[in-house]
């Protein structure tokens, strides 16, 4: 059986999703490729927006939509150069974050697929 959004929420809960996002941002802050893409004075805001988006995407909360409207992910990420290296680093750091908080393997199946598809969708630089 293929895991669903509801399976991920049941397995991780809101606290687990927030812990995963926090673990991800601890890595991003010190990463030479990723950290320059984030506003130095808004780390907490960036973390909250991703956590809120994930909870929305997993069907646990509408807070993201209520505060920010449609996700418009490509538009929101358009100002940043996102190529293969950036995509791959984002996925690596998120994978490490999932490892750190011990996301259950069946939930990881869903999240890995979702993150890979979304990270590739964010690319706005040609392969080179």
Image: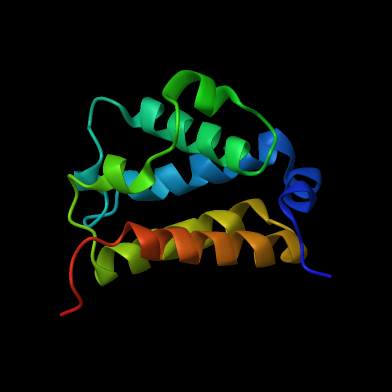
Q: Residue furthest right?
A: 1
Residue in view at x 77 percent, y 47 percent: 6
Give the total of numbered labels: 0
Q: Residue furthest top?
A: 67
The part of the image, by quadrant, that contains residue 18 is: top right
Position of the N terminus by quadrant? bottom right
The part of the image, by quadrant, that contains residue 110 is: bottom right
Position of the C terminus by quadrant? bottom left
Q: Please state the horizontal and vertical placement of residue 5, each as a whole percent of the image.
A: 71, 50
Q: Is residue 14 above or below residue 113?
A: above
Scheme of image coloration: rainbow
Q: Is residue 86 above or below residue 10?
A: below
63 or 11, which lies in front? 63
68 or 111, which lies in front? 68
Residue in view at x 77 percent, y 68 percent: 2
The part of the image, by quadrant, that contains residue 14 is: top right
For residue 1, side relative to residue 120 (left or right): right
Residue in view at x 57 percent, y 46 percent: 20
For residue 52, side relative to residue 80 (left or right): right
Q: Please state the horizontal and vertical placement of residue 89, each as a whole percent of the image.
A: 34, 64
For residue 88, side relative to residue 1 (left or right): left
For residue 90, side relative to residue 78 (left or right): right
Q: Please state the horizontal and vertical placement of residue 24, each as a whole percent of the image.
A: 46, 48
Residue in view at x 22 percent, y 32 percent: 40
């Amino acid at each position: 059986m293929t895991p669903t959004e509801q399976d991920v929420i049941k397995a991780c809960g809101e606290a687990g999703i927030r812990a995963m996002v926090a673990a991800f941002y601890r890595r991003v802050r010190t990463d030479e490729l990723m950290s320059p893409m984030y506003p130095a004075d808004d780390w907490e805001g960036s973390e909250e927006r991703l956590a809120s988006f994930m909870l929305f995407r997993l069907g646990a909360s509408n807070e993201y939509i209520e505060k920010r409207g449609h996700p418009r992910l490509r538009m929101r990420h358009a100002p940043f150069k996102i190529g293969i290296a950036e995509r791959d680093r984002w996925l690596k750091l998120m994978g490490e974050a999932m490892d750190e908080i011990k996301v259950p393997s069946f939930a990881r199946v869903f999240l890995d697929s979702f993150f890979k598809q979304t990270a590739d969708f964010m690319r706005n630089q040609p392969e080179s």
